[in-house]
Amino acid sequence: MPHYISLGKWTDQGIKNVKESPKRADAVTALANKLGAKMEIFYTMGRYDIVAITEAANDEIANQLLLEIGRLGNVRTETLKAWTVSEGTKIVAKLQ
C-alpha cells in the first residue's frame, strides 16, 4: 500500500486554537479510516509543527484526505510519496 509523509505547519487559525488540536487529530484519523486509509500523526519541533504518515490504497484517496484536511484551515501541508526499502529496492533493481 502506498505511503505518504505529510509535513504540516499551523496556520494562524490552527495555532490560535492549538488546544483543540488533539480533537482535530482524532477527527482526521477517523476520516482517514473512513476513506480506507491509515494515518499516524506526530507533533514535531523545528521547521514543521506536525508530521503525518499515511497509508492509502492510491493517490486519489490520499489527495482527497489531504484536501479535506486543508479546507479545515488549521494546517498547511507538504506531502511526499514514499516507498519502503523493499519497494525501493525493486525499483533500483530495474535500473539499466
Image (cartoon, helix red, strand yellow):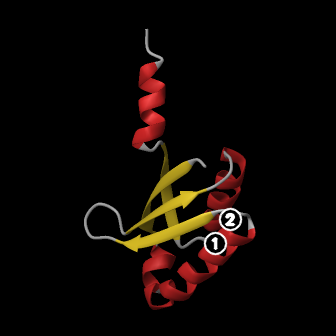
Q: Position of residue 21 (x, y in %)?
A: 49, 84
Q: Position of residue 61 (x, y in %)?
A: 71, 54
How far apart are labels 2 and 1 at the CA level?
7 Å
- 91 left or right of 31 in image: left
Number of residues whose C-alpha sits closer than 10 Å to that of mark 1, classed few (under 14), some (14–19) or many (20 or more): few
Q: Position of residue 13 (x, y in %)?
A: 51, 78
Q: Residue at x 62, y 59 (%)?
A: 66
From the image, tell me which residue sits under label 1.
Answer: 72
Q: Residue at x 48, y 26 (%)?
A: 91
Q: Residue at x 68, y 47 (%)?
A: 58
Q: Answer above or below: position of 61 versus 86.
A: below
Q: CB atoms at circles 2 and 1 under 8 Å apart?
A: yes
Q: Residue at x 27, y 70 (%)?
A: 45
Q: Position of residue 73 (x, y in %)?
A: 59, 70
Q: Quadrant of residue 48?
A: bottom left
From the image, tell me which residue sits under label 2.
Answer: 68
Query: Outermost residue, left direction?
Result: 46
Split into 4 quadrants, where in the image is the C terminus?
Answer: top left
- Total of numbered circles in the picture? 2
Q: Quadrant of residue 19?
A: bottom left
- 54 left or right of 88 in image: right
Name the secondary structure under disc 1. Answer: helix
The front one of 19 and 35 is: 35
**Amino acid beneath label 1:** Leu
